[in-house]
Amino acid sequence: MVLSNSSRLSIFTWHIHGSYLYYLSLGNYDIYIPIQDKRTEGYYGRGETFPFGPNVIEIPVAEIQQMNFDCILFQSTNNFLVDQYEVLSAKQRQLPKIYVEHNTPTSSPVDSRHIMDDASVIMVHVTHFNKLMWHNTTPIIKVIEHGVTMPKDQYTGSIEKGIVVINHIEQRGRITGWDIFSQANNSVPLDLVGMGTKESGGLGEVLHPQLPSFISKYRFFFNPIRYTSFGLAVCEAMMAGMPIVALATTEYVTIIKDGENGFIDTNVERLIKKMKLLIDNHSLAKQMGDQARTTAIEKFGIRRFVSEWESMFHLAIEYNNQFIYEKEDSVY
Protein backbone atom coordinates (compact mmCIF):
# COMPACT_ATOMS: atom_id res chain seq x y z
CA MET A 1 0.00 0.00 0.00
CA VAL A 2 1.06 3.61 -0.61
CA LEU A 3 0.63 5.35 2.73
CA SER A 4 1.77 8.85 3.61
CA ASN A 5 4.57 9.42 6.09
CA SER A 6 2.90 12.43 7.70
CA SER A 7 1.43 12.38 11.22
CA ARG A 8 -1.66 14.01 9.66
CA LEU A 9 -3.80 11.82 7.47
CA SER A 10 -3.68 12.51 3.74
CA ILE A 11 -7.06 12.12 2.07
CA PHE A 12 -7.58 12.08 -1.69
CA THR A 13 -10.99 13.08 -3.00
CA TRP A 14 -12.69 15.02 -5.77
CA HIS A 15 -14.29 18.48 -5.56
CA ILE A 16 -17.96 17.51 -5.99
CA HIS A 17 -19.98 19.62 -3.51
CA GLY A 18 -18.05 22.76 -2.60
CA SER A 19 -19.86 23.55 0.64
CA TYR A 20 -19.54 19.97 1.89
CA LEU A 21 -15.86 19.89 0.98
CA TYR A 22 -15.34 23.16 2.86
CA TYR A 23 -16.88 21.84 6.08
CA LEU A 24 -15.01 18.54 5.66
CA SER A 25 -11.75 20.47 5.30
CA LEU A 26 -12.08 21.93 8.80
CA GLY A 27 -10.81 18.66 10.29
CA ASN A 28 -7.32 17.66 11.38
CA TYR A 29 -6.18 16.09 8.10
CA ASP A 30 -5.00 17.14 4.65
CA ILE A 31 -7.28 16.87 1.62
CA TYR A 32 -5.83 16.50 -1.87
CA ILE A 33 -8.05 17.31 -4.85
CA PRO A 34 -7.21 16.81 -8.55
CA ILE A 35 -7.06 19.55 -11.15
CA GLN A 36 -6.73 19.49 -14.92
CA ASP A 37 -6.89 22.04 -17.72
CA LYS A 38 -10.48 21.10 -18.51
CA ARG A 39 -12.29 21.91 -15.25
CA THR A 40 -14.95 19.20 -15.39
CA GLU A 41 -16.90 17.91 -12.37
CA GLY A 42 -14.52 16.84 -9.65
CA TYR A 43 -11.56 18.66 -11.19
CA TYR A 44 -12.47 22.25 -10.28
CA GLY A 45 -9.65 22.65 -7.78
CA ARG A 46 -10.01 25.01 -4.85
CA GLY A 47 -11.79 27.68 -6.89
CA GLU A 48 -12.44 31.15 -5.52
CA THR A 49 -15.82 30.66 -3.79
CA PHE A 50 -14.87 28.92 -0.55
CA PRO A 51 -12.29 30.07 2.03
CA PHE A 52 -10.35 26.82 2.00
CA GLY A 53 -7.38 26.60 4.33
CA PRO A 54 -3.88 25.42 3.37
CA ASN A 55 -4.86 21.79 4.08
CA VAL A 56 -6.86 21.65 0.82
CA ILE A 57 -4.16 20.96 -1.75
CA GLU A 58 -4.50 20.85 -5.52
CA ILE A 59 -2.68 18.13 -7.49
CA PRO A 60 -2.35 18.09 -11.27
CA VAL A 61 -3.77 14.82 -12.59
CA ALA A 62 -0.40 13.86 -14.08
CA GLU A 63 1.22 13.91 -10.61
CA ILE A 64 -1.40 11.97 -8.64
CA GLN A 65 0.15 8.53 -9.08
CA GLN A 66 3.44 9.72 -7.55
CA MET A 67 1.67 10.88 -4.36
CA ASN A 68 1.22 9.04 -1.05
CA PHE A 69 -2.26 8.98 0.49
CA ASP A 70 -3.85 7.32 3.50
CA CYS A 71 -7.42 7.06 2.23
CA ILE A 72 -9.48 7.57 -0.94
CA LEU A 73 -12.89 9.25 -0.59
CA PHE A 74 -15.44 8.74 -3.38
CA GLN A 75 -18.29 11.26 -3.58
CA SER A 76 -20.12 10.33 -6.77
CA THR A 77 -20.97 7.47 -9.11
CA ASN A 78 -18.45 8.77 -11.62
CA ASN A 79 -15.69 8.88 -8.98
CA PHE A 80 -16.27 5.21 -8.21
CA LEU A 81 -16.94 3.82 -11.70
CA VAL A 82 -14.65 5.97 -13.85
CA ASP A 83 -12.39 8.50 -12.14
CA GLN A 84 -10.50 6.14 -9.87
CA TYR A 85 -9.40 4.05 -12.85
CA GLU A 86 -8.35 7.09 -14.86
CA VAL A 87 -6.27 8.93 -12.25
CA LEU A 88 -5.19 6.47 -9.54
CA SER A 89 -2.53 3.78 -9.86
CA ALA A 90 -3.31 0.12 -9.21
CA LYS A 91 -1.53 0.38 -5.82
CA GLN A 92 -3.47 3.50 -4.87
CA ARG A 93 -6.72 1.72 -5.68
CA GLN A 94 -5.80 -0.80 -2.96
CA LEU A 95 -5.70 1.95 -0.32
CA PRO A 96 -8.43 2.33 2.33
CA LYS A 97 -11.56 3.66 0.65
CA ILE A 98 -14.80 5.36 1.69
CA TYR A 99 -17.81 6.25 -0.44
CA VAL A 100 -19.93 9.13 0.91
CA GLU A 101 -23.41 9.16 -0.61
CA HIS A 102 -24.88 12.66 -0.56
CA ASN A 103 -28.24 11.88 -2.15
CA THR A 104 -31.43 9.88 -1.80
CA PRO A 105 -32.12 7.01 -4.26
CA THR A 106 -33.62 8.16 -7.54
CA SER A 107 -35.06 5.35 -9.68
CA SER A 108 -36.92 3.84 -6.71
CA PRO A 109 -37.02 5.12 -3.13
CA VAL A 110 -36.85 1.59 -1.70
CA ASP A 111 -35.46 -0.76 -4.35
CA SER A 112 -32.49 1.21 -5.70
CA ARG A 113 -29.39 -0.95 -5.33
CA HIS A 114 -26.38 1.25 -4.69
CA ILE A 115 -23.71 1.05 -7.38
CA MET A 116 -20.99 0.83 -4.74
CA ASP A 117 -20.79 -2.91 -4.20
CA ASP A 118 -17.11 -3.28 -3.26
CA ALA A 119 -16.84 -5.05 0.11
CA SER A 120 -13.50 -3.34 0.79
CA VAL A 121 -15.10 0.13 0.76
CA ILE A 122 -16.92 1.69 3.72
CA MET A 123 -20.25 3.31 2.83
CA VAL A 124 -21.15 6.57 4.59
CA HIS A 125 -24.58 8.21 4.26
CA VAL A 126 -25.27 11.80 5.31
CA THR A 127 -28.68 11.01 6.85
CA HIS A 128 -30.28 7.98 8.48
CA PHE A 129 -33.15 8.32 6.00
CA ASN A 130 -30.72 7.82 3.11
CA LYS A 131 -29.22 4.74 4.76
CA LEU A 132 -32.73 3.37 5.34
CA MET A 133 -33.89 3.83 1.75
CA TRP A 134 -30.82 2.80 -0.25
CA HIS A 135 -30.38 -0.92 -0.91
CA ASN A 136 -26.81 -1.19 0.35
CA THR A 137 -24.91 -4.46 -0.18
CA THR A 138 -21.55 -3.83 1.49
CA PRO A 139 -20.59 -4.95 5.01
CA ILE A 140 -19.94 -1.60 6.70
CA ILE A 141 -22.58 1.14 6.36
CA LYS A 142 -22.31 4.25 8.53
CA VAL A 143 -23.99 7.65 8.90
CA ILE A 144 -22.23 10.98 9.47
CA GLU A 145 -24.79 13.75 9.70
CA HIS A 146 -23.97 17.25 8.48
CA GLY A 147 -21.88 19.74 10.39
CA VAL A 148 -21.75 23.50 9.81
CA THR A 149 -20.08 26.46 11.45
CA MET A 150 -21.81 29.19 13.44
CA PRO A 151 -22.22 32.18 11.07
CA LYS A 152 -21.09 35.63 12.12
CA ASP A 153 -24.41 37.21 11.16
CA GLN A 154 -27.43 35.94 13.07
CA TYR A 155 -31.14 36.14 12.36
CA THR A 156 -32.95 39.47 12.24
CA GLY A 157 -36.03 38.56 10.17
CA SER A 158 -36.41 42.19 9.17
CA ILE A 159 -37.47 41.35 5.58
CA GLU A 160 -41.14 40.31 5.65
CA LYS A 161 -40.65 37.50 3.16
CA GLY A 162 -39.57 33.91 3.09
CA ILE A 163 -36.35 32.82 1.37
CA VAL A 164 -35.83 29.69 -0.75
CA VAL A 165 -32.32 28.47 -1.65
CA ILE A 166 -32.31 25.86 -4.44
CA ASN A 167 -30.15 25.63 -7.54
CA HIS A 168 -31.99 25.24 -10.88
CA ILE A 169 -35.31 24.70 -9.12
CA GLU A 170 -37.54 25.13 -12.20
CA GLN A 171 -35.37 22.93 -14.41
CA ARG A 172 -35.37 20.13 -11.81
CA GLY A 173 -39.16 20.25 -11.55
CA ARG A 174 -41.27 18.32 -9.08
CA ILE A 175 -38.45 16.76 -7.11
CA THR A 176 -37.25 20.21 -5.98
CA GLY A 177 -40.83 21.44 -5.59
CA TRP A 178 -41.01 24.08 -8.31
CA ASP A 179 -44.80 23.65 -8.38
CA ILE A 180 -45.01 23.95 -4.58
CA PHE A 181 -42.84 27.06 -4.57
CA SER A 182 -45.02 28.60 -7.29
CA GLN A 183 -48.20 27.78 -5.39
CA ALA A 184 -46.88 29.27 -2.15
CA ASN A 185 -45.45 32.31 -3.92
CA ASN A 186 -48.93 33.18 -5.21
CA SER A 187 -50.06 33.69 -1.59
CA VAL A 188 -46.90 34.55 0.35
CA PRO A 189 -43.99 36.81 -0.63
CA LEU A 190 -40.99 34.59 -1.31
CA ASP A 191 -37.55 35.33 -2.73
CA LEU A 192 -35.60 32.63 -4.55
CA VAL A 193 -31.81 32.35 -4.77
CA GLY A 194 -29.49 29.79 -6.29
CA MET A 195 -27.78 28.97 -9.56
CA GLY A 196 -30.10 29.29 -12.54
CA THR A 197 -32.85 31.06 -10.59
CA LYS A 198 -32.76 34.38 -12.44
CA GLU A 199 -34.39 32.61 -15.38
CA SER A 200 -37.19 31.60 -13.00
CA GLY A 201 -37.81 35.07 -11.57
CA GLY A 202 -35.34 34.63 -8.73
CA LEU A 203 -32.37 36.68 -7.57
CA GLY A 204 -29.63 34.41 -8.93
CA GLU A 205 -26.73 32.84 -7.09
CA VAL A 206 -25.46 34.10 -3.75
CA LEU A 207 -21.98 32.73 -3.08
CA HIS A 208 -21.68 30.45 -0.08
CA PRO A 209 -19.56 32.76 2.12
CA GLN A 210 -22.19 35.52 1.80
CA LEU A 211 -25.25 33.25 2.04
CA PRO A 212 -25.77 33.14 5.86
CA SER A 213 -25.69 36.93 6.10
CA PHE A 214 -28.02 37.26 3.10
CA ILE A 215 -30.71 34.82 4.23
CA SER A 216 -30.67 35.81 7.93
CA LYS A 217 -32.56 39.03 7.12
CA TYR A 218 -35.60 37.10 5.86
CA ARG A 219 -38.51 36.17 8.14
CA PHE A 220 -38.27 32.40 7.51
CA PHE A 221 -36.53 29.77 5.40
CA PHE A 222 -38.77 27.69 3.14
CA ASN A 223 -37.73 24.32 1.72
CA PRO A 224 -40.26 23.00 -0.86
CA ILE A 225 -38.24 19.95 -1.93
CA ARG A 226 -40.34 16.78 -1.89
CA TYR A 227 -37.62 14.16 -1.78
CA THR A 228 -34.12 15.01 -0.73
CA SER A 229 -31.27 14.49 1.60
CA PHE A 230 -31.13 17.03 4.44
CA GLY A 231 -29.82 20.17 2.73
CA LEU A 232 -26.76 22.00 4.02
CA ALA A 233 -28.55 25.29 3.32
CA VAL A 234 -31.21 24.29 5.85
CA CYS A 235 -28.53 23.42 8.43
CA GLU A 236 -26.92 26.81 7.85
CA ALA A 237 -30.26 28.63 8.14
CA MET A 238 -30.99 26.89 11.44
CA MET A 239 -27.52 27.70 12.77
CA ALA A 240 -28.18 31.36 11.90
CA GLY A 241 -31.37 31.20 13.98
CA MET A 242 -34.01 31.06 11.23
CA PRO A 243 -37.35 29.27 11.61
CA ILE A 244 -37.78 26.56 8.97
CA VAL A 245 -40.89 25.78 6.91
CA ALA A 246 -40.64 22.46 5.08
CA LEU A 247 -42.51 19.45 3.79
CA ALA A 248 -42.93 16.65 6.34
CA THR A 249 -40.90 14.18 4.30
CA THR A 250 -37.50 12.43 4.41
CA GLU A 251 -35.14 13.33 7.29
CA TYR A 252 -36.92 16.64 7.96
CA VAL A 253 -39.53 15.01 10.19
CA THR A 254 -36.82 13.98 12.68
CA ILE A 255 -35.26 17.44 12.96
CA ILE A 256 -37.98 20.06 12.38
CA LYS A 257 -40.41 19.96 15.31
CA ASP A 258 -43.70 21.39 14.15
CA GLY A 259 -44.59 24.55 16.06
CA GLU A 260 -41.25 24.60 17.92
CA ASN A 261 -38.31 25.30 15.58
CA GLY A 262 -40.40 25.59 12.44
CA PHE A 263 -43.43 24.20 10.67
CA ILE A 264 -43.69 20.96 8.69
CA ASP A 265 -46.66 19.42 6.95
CA THR A 266 -47.62 17.49 3.83
CA ASN A 267 -50.57 19.85 3.34
CA VAL A 268 -49.20 22.82 1.38
CA GLU A 269 -52.26 24.98 2.19
CA ARG A 270 -51.58 24.58 5.90
CA LEU A 271 -47.93 25.46 5.36
CA ILE A 272 -48.98 28.63 3.53
CA LYS A 273 -51.10 29.62 6.54
CA LYS A 274 -48.08 29.08 8.81
CA MET A 275 -45.90 31.21 6.51
CA LYS A 276 -48.43 34.02 6.76
CA LEU A 277 -48.40 33.63 10.54
CA LEU A 278 -44.62 34.04 10.64
CA ILE A 279 -44.76 37.12 8.42
CA ASP A 280 -47.41 38.67 10.67
CA ASN A 281 -45.72 37.69 13.94
CA HIS A 282 -42.05 38.64 14.06
CA SER A 283 -41.69 37.73 17.74
CA LEU A 284 -43.00 34.20 17.10
CA ALA A 285 -40.59 33.82 14.20
CA LYS A 286 -37.71 34.96 16.43
CA GLN A 287 -38.74 32.54 19.18
CA MET A 288 -38.91 29.62 16.74
CA GLY A 289 -35.60 30.68 15.16
CA ASP A 290 -33.93 30.55 18.58
CA GLN A 291 -35.18 26.99 18.94
CA ALA A 292 -33.87 26.17 15.44
CA ARG A 293 -30.43 27.44 16.44
CA THR A 294 -30.49 25.32 19.60
CA THR A 295 -31.37 22.27 17.50
CA ALA A 296 -28.60 23.05 15.02
CA ILE A 297 -25.98 23.46 17.74
CA GLU A 298 -26.96 20.10 19.22
CA LYS A 299 -27.33 18.30 15.88
CA PHE A 300 -24.97 19.95 13.39
CA GLY A 301 -21.96 21.11 15.37
CA ILE A 302 -18.81 21.28 13.26
CA ARG A 303 -16.59 19.73 15.94
CA ARG A 304 -18.75 16.61 16.07
CA PHE A 305 -18.78 16.42 12.27
CA VAL A 306 -15.02 16.61 11.69
CA SER A 307 -14.31 14.37 14.69
CA GLU A 308 -16.57 11.69 13.24
CA TRP A 309 -14.88 12.01 9.87
CA GLU A 310 -11.42 11.71 11.37
CA SER A 311 -12.54 8.57 13.23
CA MET A 312 -14.05 7.26 9.99
CA PHE A 313 -10.78 7.66 8.11
CA HIS A 314 -8.98 5.72 10.86
CA LEU A 315 -11.69 3.04 10.76
CA ALA A 316 -11.22 2.73 6.99
CA ILE A 317 -7.48 2.20 7.47
CA GLU A 318 -8.03 -0.48 10.12
CA TYR A 319 -10.72 -2.16 8.07
CA ASN A 320 -8.59 -2.18 4.94
CA ASN A 321 -5.68 -3.79 6.77
CA GLN A 322 -8.02 -6.47 8.10
CA PHE A 323 -9.64 -6.94 4.68
CA ILE A 324 -6.28 -7.44 2.98
CA TYR A 325 -5.08 -9.79 5.73
CA GLU A 326 -8.20 -11.96 5.45
CA LYS A 327 -7.98 -11.93 1.66
CA GLU A 328 -4.35 -13.02 1.72
CA ASP A 329 -5.03 -15.60 4.45
CA SER A 330 -7.77 -17.20 2.36
CA VAL A 331 -5.24 -17.87 -0.42
CA TYR A 332 -3.17 -20.19 1.78
Image (cartoon, rainbow, N blue to C red):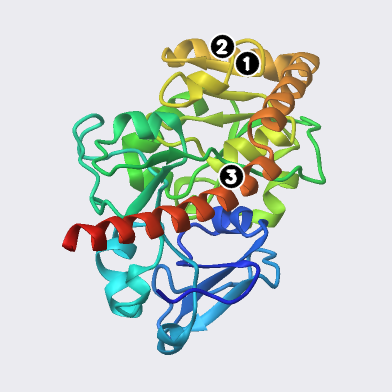
Q: Residues within 10 Å of mark 3 (few under 14, many from 20)?
A: some
Spot occupied by residue 280 in the image (x, y as percentages of width and height): 72, 15
Q: Residue shown at 40%/84% (left/top)?
A: 65
Q: CA distance from mark 2 to mark 1?
A: 5 Å
Q: Amino acid at mark 2?
A: Lys
Q: Amino acid at mark 1?
A: Lys
Instruction: Name the element at disc 2.
Output: helix
Q: Quadrant of residue 111?
A: top left
Q: Residues within 10 Å of mark 2 (few under 14, many from 20)?
A: some
Name the quadrant of the N terminus.
bottom left
User: Which residue is tagged 2?
Assistant: 273
Q: Is residue 119 left or right of residue 260?
A: left
Q: Nearer the viewer, residue 221 or 114?
A: 114
The answer to whether residue 182 shows anywhere in this view is no
Instruction: Name the element at disc 3.
Output: helix
Q: CA distance from mark 3 to mark 2?
A: 39 Å
User: Which residue is tagged 1?
Assistant: 276
Q: CA distance from mark 1 to mark 3?
A: 39 Å
Asked whether disc 2 touches disc 1, contact meaning CB atoms under 8 Å apart, the reply is yes
Residue 143 circle label: none
Residue 308 circle label: 3
User: Nearer the N terminus, badge 1 or badge 3?
Assistant: 1
The answer to whether residue 202 shows anywhere in this view is yes
Q: Amino acid at mark 3?
A: Glu
Q: Nearer the viewer, residue 324 or 18?
A: 324
Q: Residue shown at 42%/84% (left/top)?
A: 61
Q: Is residue 188 left or right of residue 225?
A: right
Spot occupied by residue 296 in the image (x, y as percentages of width and height): 67, 31
